[in-house]
């Protein structure tokens, strides 16, 4: 779609601009030892878009206010190890369900979703980190329509991603959090944007709150996942 292609060009240009500016402004990064971060978090995602399973298609929408009813179970964890170079891993799992009233009756969509990311980090400066890697998504979905019955499908796909994270200090304890990436591969396009703040309780502990938006357009055979997921995330990070 032209909208997605235009956004991909803009997002890629923005990420590249961050990386180039980081190289130009690079400061010394502490390389005396590895820094590790373990961060469990929760992402209360709403959902909006189109799901096709078999010959059945449904428009799915659950607003942020409906997240408590929409998300049955969820768990997430992020890990980073960093010097000048580093690596990261991130996994998020949720069991989701949504029911919509239509002229032909109630349409119910249920699925288990796993999103996993892994890749390499590079510190241009202390508050600007570039990254590249892969985003893996797996869905075990079921679509139940009054006319035509139930359709189910189990799909997974992997996309290459490139992005940057900017965490400027706002005060002694507060910091901003800006993150964006874009990619593709098995899907036509995937992109992520995140903005929030962090608060440092001590040298080792910090809390984070951020709004995250993830858009994915995957289409294979009789399965389509053209979905935008967005919502508020809360996390606790331990650094050592």
Image (tube, rainbow, N blue to C red):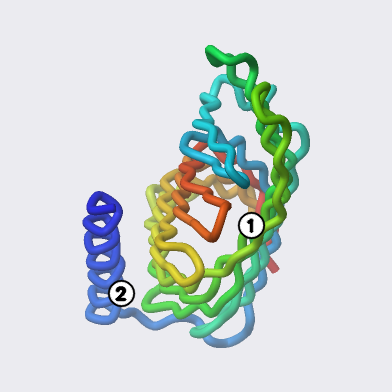
Q: Callout 1 environment at 10 Å: few (<14), some (14 to 19), or many (20+)?
A: some
Vertically, is 43 above or below 240?
above
Q: Residue at x 22, y 59 (%)?
A: 10
Coordinates of residue 229 in the picture (x, y in percent):
51, 41
Residue ID for mark 1: 115
Q: 37 or 185: which is nearer to us?
A: 185
Q: Which mark is residue 50?
A: none
How far across and down, in percent of the image, does residue 226 sit?
47, 47
Q: Of all residues shown, which one is farthest toward the front?
A: 148
Name the residue located 72 percent from the left edge and 45 percent from the top edge.
152
Is 114 situated above or below 240?
above
Quarter location, residue 91: bottom right
Say which of 65 and 77 sits in front. Answer: 65
Distance between the Cα atoms at labels 2 and 1? 25 Å
* Location of the C terminus (image quadrant): bottom right
Secondary structure of the residue carrying numbered label 1: strand
Q: Answer with left or right where residue 1 lies relative to residue 195.
A: left
Question: Which numbered disc flags the more N-terminal residue, 2 or 1?
Answer: 2
Judged left or right of residue 104, residue 166 is: left
Q: Residue at x 56, y 20 (%)?
A: 65
Can residue 197 be seen?
A: yes
Picture quadrant where residue 39 is located: bottom right
Q: Secondary structure at mark 2?
A: helix
Vertically, is 15 above or below 23? Answer: above
Q: Which residue was labeled with disc 2? A: 19
- How far across and down, in percent of the image, does residue 107 sit? 63, 24
Question: On the rendered structure, is 77 left or right of 59?
Answer: right
Packing grade of label 2 (10 A; few <14, some 14-19, many >=20) is many
């Amino acid at each position: 779609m032209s909208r997605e292609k235009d956004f991909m060009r803009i997002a890629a240009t923005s990420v590249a601009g961050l990386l180039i500016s980081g190289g130009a402004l690079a400061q010394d990064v502490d390389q005396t030892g590895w820094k590790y971060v373990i961060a469990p978090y929760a992402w209360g995602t709403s959902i909006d878009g189109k799901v096709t399973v078999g010959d059945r298609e449904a428009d799915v929408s659950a607003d942020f206010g409906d997240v408590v009813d929409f998300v049955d179970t969820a768990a997430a964890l992020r890990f980073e190890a960093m010097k000048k170079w580093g690596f990261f891993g991130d996994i998020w799992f949720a069991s989701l369900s949504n029911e919509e009233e239509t002229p032909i009756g109630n349409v119910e969509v249920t699925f288990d979703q796993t999103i996993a990311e892994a890749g390499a980090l590079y510190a241009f400066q202390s508050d600007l980190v570039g990254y590249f890697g892969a985003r893996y998504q797996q869905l075990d979905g079921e679509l139940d329509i009054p006319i035509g019955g139930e359709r189910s499908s189990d799909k997974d796909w992997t996309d290459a991603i490139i992005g940057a994270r900017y965490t400027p200090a706002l005060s002694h304890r507060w910091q901003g959090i800006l993150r964006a990436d874009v990619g593709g591969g098995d899907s036509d396009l995937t992109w992520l944007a995140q903005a929030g703040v962090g608060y440092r309780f001590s040298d080792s502990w910090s809390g984070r709150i951020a709004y995250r938006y993830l858009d994915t357009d995957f289409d294979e055979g009789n399965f389509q996942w053209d979905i935008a997921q967005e919502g508020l995330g809360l996390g606790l990070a331990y650094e050592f």
